[in-house]
Every structure is written in structure tokens, then in C-alpha cells.
Image (cartoon, rainbow, N blue to C red):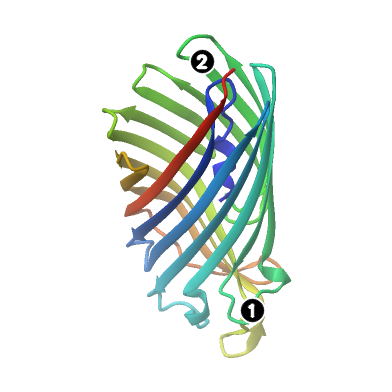
Amino acid sequence: MILSAHNKVTYGQISENHVGGAFEYALIPSLGETNLEKYIFSIDASKNMNSAKLELGLDYSALTFSFYDHRVSLSMDSYEKMHTLQPEIGYQQDFGKKWAMSVSLAPMLSSNFKNGPNSEDFIFNWSALVSKKWGKGDFPVSLTVGLGRGVVLGEPGLFPILSIKGKITPKWRYTLGFPYSRAVYEIDEKHSLGTKALVSGVYANNSETVTINGLENLANTKLTYSEIDLGLEYNYHMSSGFTTIIRVGFLIANNLEVLDNDNNPLFDFEANSSPYIAMGLKYSLNLINQLHK
């Protein structure tokens, strides 16, 4: 998703052309009286062009909600399976060894697609970032600030982007900011441990007409979900370019609602904090080194 673009500024180091992909499955068992399963697929590629970089990506998510709340005044069948499809194109331009700017465009389709795609499924996401690097040697620090538009907070809107990245030792690296923070410890060439904090959201259109209390029919209602993800992750890096991932964590400040087509709340599921487990596989192929600043 568009969050991936917020952590791609790589100027001031050896940069490589890159092709990669990832699959992840996550189970969230207890959002109050709702369960959630996530299937996430992504592919990405980057191409260096002297002092610039072009990045392409495609993300697909399949979300399966299981609702057990008997207070709901409308049928939830059409909200149980939601899908998001998001291509992304990003461009980064370096200005010397200290400064860089990047922009990313990421239009998204987010819906149950019961009646095929329509304009209510479309969300236009983007980001614009400026970065500066300090320090020399093995432990420089970079600061990135910018603005994005997306569904990070559960509904389409603007949000700030802030990131401080660096290394403490050759084995410890960190990213601190909003909406994403992470710290990673490289045990050896094959094993690493990390923690992360991520703010993310879902905003999906229900293209079917639903009936409320047996009286009112509404079209293009929305399912909105937001979370703060606090997780501990283990990575096993294989020499073939594949990495296996196991992550456990806790979701807090969760919000799960159905909205009408004017974004007025129809029902609040009063989602609880919940533990979760996620497993995945990543592939990364770094091609010919072309840039050393």
C-alpha cells in the first residue's frame, strides 16, 4: 500500500535495481465480536537513473470479516469479504548527497465488487516527501517529512509523514515516525528480529444495496476499519533471496464501523484491542549495482 512509499528514500548509499514480491497471511481473532483474516500480496520494482529512481508496485489485499454481533440492524453478508487493489508509481530525485525529494501516486479500488467496479470504489492516494541526511561514515541519520493522502486513519484524507532513520551499531537500525516506526536487530546473515508500530486503515465500498431495520434501502455504504499495530517480527533470510516472516503482536485503538454514503455512522462494532499472528514470505532480487555516491 501507499505506506510502502514512505520508507523508500535510499539516497547516499549503494543503490541497486530491485525486483521483489511478498505474501502475508494474518489472523486477528478478537475485534470484539468480529474476527478478521487478511491475505496480502505485493510486487515491486525499482530502476536507478543516474541521480533519480523510478519505482513501480502493485498491492492486493483480501479481507474476510466474521461478524457475530447480534445488535446489528442490517445484514452483514455483503461486508464479509472486501478487496483492495492498488498500483503505485513513485519517483525520487536526489540533489547532491544530502537532499532528496520523492512523489508517489497510488490509485486504489476498494470494494466487495458485488456489482463490478464503480466510481464509489475508487480512492486516489498520493504522497510527497522531502529528505535530508546528516553525518558521515557508517551511521548517517536521515529525516523525511511530507504529506500523504490515503486511508491510514480509516477514511480517505490527508495525513502527515515523518520519519527519522539511522543505525545505532552495524547490527541495529531504526525508523521512528508516523505512520510507521521500526527497530531491527540483525543477529547474523540469516536471522533478524524487529519491532514495529504502524497506523493503518481500510475503507471499502459495499456496492450492494442494504436494508436497515427492514425499512430503508441504502446503496454504496462503506466499511471502515483503523488500527495501531504493535508487533514483534522474526525474519529468516535464505540465500536464494527469499525471507520467511513470523510476526506476533497486539492491535490497539481499533475502530470498525459501517457508514452511509455520506460517511455518517450507521453502526459501530465497538472493536476491542486484539492479539494477532501473521506469517509471510518475501522475495527480493537486487540486480546490478549502478550507483555509489
Disc 1: CA contacts within 10 A as few (<14), some (14-19) or many (>=20): few
Q: Closer to the camera, 83 or 16?
A: 16
Residue placed farthest to the top in the image?
A: 136
Q: Which residue is mark 1?
A: 116
Q: Is residue 212 above or below residue 14?
A: below
Element type where label 1 sits in the image? loop
Going by the numbered disc 1, the residue's amino acid type is Gly
Going by the numbered disc 2, the residue's amino acid type is Pro
- Which mark sits nearer the N-terminus, 1 or 2? 1
Q: Which mark is residue 140?
A: 2
The image shows residue 132 at horizontal and vertical percentages of: 63, 20
Q: Quadrant of the C terminus?
A: top right
- Determine whether, in the image, residue 255 is placed left or right of residue 146: left
What residue is at 52 percent from the left and 39 percent from the top?
18
What residue is at 63 percent from the left and 84 percent from the top?
209
Figure label count: 2
Q: CA distance from mark 1 to mark 2?
A: 49 Å
What residue is at 36 percent from the left and 23 percent from the top?
172
Residue placed farthest to the front in the image?
A: 288
- Determine whether, in the image, residue 104 is placed left or right of residue 266: right
